[in-house]
Amino acid sequence: MKIEDLSNMRQDYTVGDLREQMVQSDPLDQFKLWMEKAIELDIVEPNAMIIATSTVAGKPSARTVLLKEVNKNGFVFFTNYNSRKGRELSANPFASVVFDWHAIARQVRIEGRVEKISESDSDDYFNSRPESSKIGAWVSPQSQVIRERAELELMQVEYEKQFEGRTIHRPPFWGGFLIRPDVIEFWQGRPNRLHDRIVYYKTEDGWTIHRLAP
């Protein structure tokens, strides 16, 4: 098919279904089950997630980051705090996330409030990273305009010399964010576009579960 045929491109999803009686009472437990299945089936980078942020004025932006932890409080990822997403989250601490496991016709959508994790937790993760990734965190002025790639490569050499034989500590402008979810939706592709959508809403008493029309 060619790009002119986009309107005629269709995929019928027949790999599974999702019913209320099948899901866990806690959406974080349900997410872990689905993530484990995506890993088991060798989905490429199953922890890749699209995260949308917005300015205080409501202008949105989206990009892909990697999920690094799921715990009882929510979802953790790491970034440069001075990047566009970092600055937007500091000013407007809410985000929406999508995991798209298209090979198994599944998506997970998350909405919630975002906060920085502790410096010690950020240190622990940073210290577990390969040395090259640690250097990269120092090198890149993420989201800022640079003249050319050679500028980054020169900075990389400079930081490699600076840290040679020394411990590479975490940059103060780099660390983790925690997304505390208040909405988590699980989407399972079904035939004829009549997809299954099960959504959890956070309440004072826990989570409520509902089915949404596709």
Image (cartoon, rainbow, N blue to C red):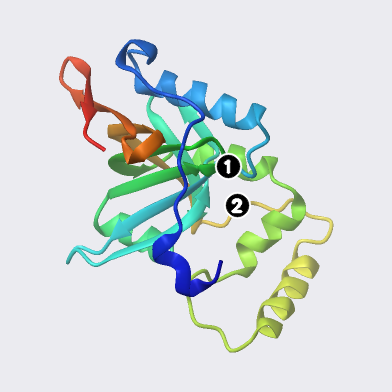
Number of numbered callouts drawn? 2
Does label 1 or label 2 sit earlier along the sequence? Answer: 1
Q: Mark 2: which amino acid?
A: Arg
As helix, strand or loop, the secondary structure at mark 1 comes to helix
Q: Amino acid at mark 1?
A: Asp
Q: Which mark is residue 183?
A: none
Left or right of residue 20, residue 145 in this image: right
| The quadrant where residue 160 appears | bottom right
| Position in image of residue 93 (x %, y %) | 27, 50
- Answer above or below: position of 39 versus 51: above
Left or right for 179, reference 124: left
- SS label for mark 2: loop
Left or right: residue 192 versus residue 49 is: left
Q: Position of residue 85 (x, y in %)?
A: 39, 60
Residue at the image point whose x is 46% and y is 38% from the top: 76
Q: Decide: is 150 above or below 185.
A: below
Numbered label attached to residue 123: 1
Residue 28: give x, y in percent of width and height.
Answer: 40, 23
Q: Which of 128 and 192 lies nearest the eye of the viewer?
A: 192
Quarter placement of the N terminus? bottom right
Residue sticking out furthest to the right? 165
Circle 2 crowding by C-alpha within 10 Å: few under 14, some 14–19, many from 20: some
Relative depth, front residue between 96 and 106 = 106
Q: Are marks 1 and 2 in contact (CB under 8 Å)?
A: yes
At a point 60% along the width and 52% down the height, the residue shown is 170
Q: On residue 170, which mark appears?
A: 2
